[in-house]
Amino acid sequence: MDSIYPALVSGLLTMGLGLALLRSGWKNSERRGRARVASGWSALLVSLYLLSSALGTLIGLTIATLAFGLYGYGLVALNAERRPLRNTYRRIATQDASPQAFGNGWGRGSAAFFLAMIATIAMGAAAAGLPIGLPVNRVTIGALVLPILWAGLIIWVLSEARLRRPVLGLCAIIGASGLLISVEMLA
């Protein structure tokens, strides 16, 4: 147990150094910047090796991913620009407070949430029923892909200027998935 801690600490410190080198290298586009970026990536690879060799592959990569995210968030928080607050009274006063604008936002959010959820579940059920690979693998892949697919569909609905196109697209996806499910059940 005592041999784990030096490798763990050195892996975490090397990861912090690698991210700091990447940050300073990307800010600087000269030759020194390229060398810092290369050494930053090298330090990150060394830290992955240290953490995975000290703690095992699964736990080491999990801790490396967690540390990477926390260090990255810390670097962003430390280097964020801080501006004084602007006076937003004019902007608030000119916003449209009509019931139509309020209802359109709720309609868009409801369509994004519920239609995307139904479309994602229908696509997952249709994909799980396909005779490709083992059923356990299909369910596992579906469990990993469906949240990402749901987020993508929600982003699609919320990013369109008009709500008609994504709603029709989601209804088409639901219909096609339902058709595929019914064909799979009959076969």
Image (spheres, rainbow, N blue to C red):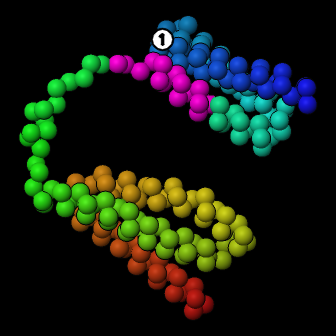
Asked if residue 58 is positioned above or below residue 166 in the image, the reply reads: above
Give how far across and how far down residue 88 sits, in percent.
16, 31
Residue at image location 47% in from the left, 67% down from the top: 120
Q: Quadrant of residue 17?
A: top right
Which residue corresponds to mark 1? 28
Q: Quadrant of residue 143?
A: bottom right
Front-most of 143 and 93? 93
Give how far across and how far down residue 152 sits, in percent.
43, 55
Give how far across and how far down residue 18 sits, in percent.
64, 19
187 drawn magenta? no
Residue at image location 19% in from the left, 61% down from the top: 103
Segment colored magenta: 68-82
Q: Amino acid at mark 1?
A: Asn
Residue at image location 65% in from the left, 31% down from the top: 67
- Residue 39 in the figure: left or right of residue 50: left
- Residue 177 in the figure: left or right of residue 171: right
Which quarter of the image is occupied by the C terminus?
bottom right
